[in-house]
Amino acid sequence: MGALHPFEQALTLLLAFGPFVVLGVVVWLRRREDGRAVPQEDSGVPESPSRTAPPIS
């Protein structure tokens, strides 16, 4: 069939790798969005009741 014209080479590369690039961008954006939605205040360690309860007289 012969060598491809430079325009045809670029189009072939775009069609071959373009969907993967778009998928990578979408995954990156969704992970960034999900990271903002998760509250950062939950450290997994419960606070001591003595810090939150008023002093007993």
Image: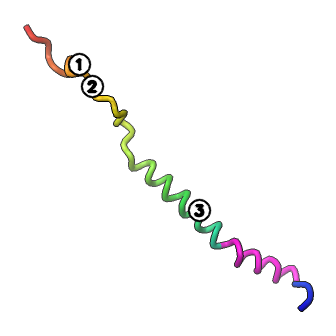
Find the magenta span and give its range.
5-18
Determine which quarter of the picture holds residue 26: bottom right
Q: Is label 3 in a helix, a strand or a loop? A: helix
Horizontal and vertical percent for residue 22? 61, 68
What residue sits 39% from the left and 39% below the top?
Answer: 40
Against 13, is 37 above or below? Answer: above
Percent x, y for residue 41? 35, 36
Label of residue 25 in the image: 3
Q: Earlier in the sequence, mark 3 or mark 2?
A: 3
Which amino acid does the dot numbered 1 rest on? Arg
What label does residue 51 carry, if any? Answer: 1
Label number found at residue 47:
2
Q: Is residue 19 left or right of residue 41?
A: right
Seen at 28% across and 29% down, the residue is 46
Say which amino acid is labelled 3.
Answer: Val
Please name the residue shown 54% across and 61% down the image: 27
Farthest right residue in view = 2
